[in-house]
Amino acid sequence: MATIPPSMAPSTANWHWKNKTVTPWAKAWFERELVTLSIKGEGSEEAGVSEVVDFEGDAELGQRKSKLLTIYDCRVGLKWKGTASDGTEVEGKVTIPEVSHENAIDGISSYIYEWSLTTPSTPTVEALFNLVKARLPVALETKFAEFPSAIIETHGKDLTVSADTSRTGTPAPPTSNIPVASGASLATIAAAAAKPAPRTETKKLNTTTVSVDANFMASADDLFSILTDEKRIPAWSRAPAKSNPQPGAEYSLFGGGVKGKYISLNPPKEIKQTWALESPTWPTGHFATLTTTFDQSSDSTKVTWSLEGVPTGFEDEITRNLQGYYVHGLKSIGLGSEL
């Protein structure tokens, strides 16, 4: 029977897939930080964020193979107030439908702003409104860029096991709702990091089968492609991938965290592949078999991942991470909520 040791060295423990949901903290961060933003015109005009009135979405910090990733997708609604050049008090609203880790990865502005003006329009009011629309996004995006680092600085210690015995990392509770996957800010591993603990050979394993499923607002053809196309996989896995969807060809996901070979592909019905977790605790040379099936209905497609050959003792961990990295990863790229 393969078991996880009760106490592991930091270099070993940090290889585990872990997640921590930080959505309540994220909401408080936006409410606190965004109201500090203000802009000024060339004259006496000025304006700023007065209140965060809407926050929806998910935020998560994940760790894969000693790498910290921020994964978030939020809708933010704001009120803004300002003073026009003639002294008129002006108010309005702006909604940013998607504040996402994808914006941070792309490195270019892809934010969408939905503006509205509450104060009756006059020439000076419109002048201030135009100023706000031109300059406030710059201030907002500068602040948004600080968000991933703030998540890691505040919560990273809860996922990373420290070598200092006075500080113990705490993994996310197993019962937490794990959001995806699209994170997106990676913490690099120091070149001199300790080598992983050697893995032990196990000649005979007690194994079981783990299955998860979810419905997505996409066709079976598209989902099949998203899960096998090397160019499309990083969009939902938030990490480098190698994939040549041909029987016998090797693949690698999550920056090398999962590896195997394709056994058979029957588009758009089924993918069968060997599957191994690159972790010191996963038995050396052992491969499970992952079968992914697609059942398309009139308005959605049910995807089922069935992993046969999971070593006994890994069931909960593998279930959480199939849900976190596959299911919520696909949700993070806009395929819609589970039905």
Image (spheres, rainbow, N blue to C red):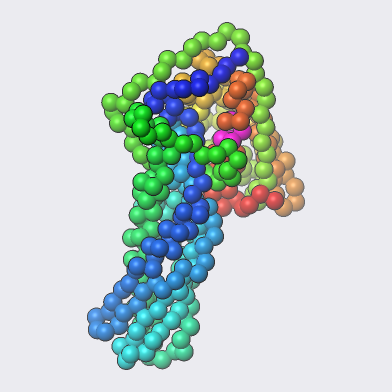
Estimate the x, y position of residue 279 in percent, counting from the top left: 47, 24
Residue at 28% across, 77% down: 40
- 292 over 179 or under it: above or below: above
In x, y percent, where is residue 321? Answer: 56, 35
In the rendered view, tell whether residue 70 sits above or below residue 263.
below
Q: Residue pushed farthest right?
A: 298
Please identify the quadrant where the N terminus is shown: top right
| Residue 213 falls within the magenta-colored stretch | no
Pick out the residue farthest to the front: 166
Q: Which residues are magenta?
A: 318-322
Identity of the residue furthest to the top in this view? 203
Q: Which residue is more in the foreground, 309 or 242?
A: 309
Main secondary structure along the magenta-highlighted residues: helix
Residue at x 30%, y 31% (from the top left corner): 190
The x and y percentages for residue 116 are 48, 78
Whether residue 305 is visible, yes or no, is yes
Name the side, left or right, on which 76 lies relative to 165.
right
How many labels were placed on the picture?
Answer: 0
Please give the name of the residue rendered at 52% of the width and 62% of the height, measured from the top-left corner.
55
Picture residue at 40% right of the left edge, 79% below the top: 81
Q: Is residue 191 left or right of residue 29?
A: left
Quadrant in which residue 3 is drawn: top right
Q: Position of residue 338 (x, y in %)?
A: 66, 49
Viewer-closest of 323 and 271: 323
Relative depth, front residue between 322 and 242: 322
Work out whether residue 99 can be spotted.
Answer: no
Q: Is residue 241 above or below residue 72?
A: above
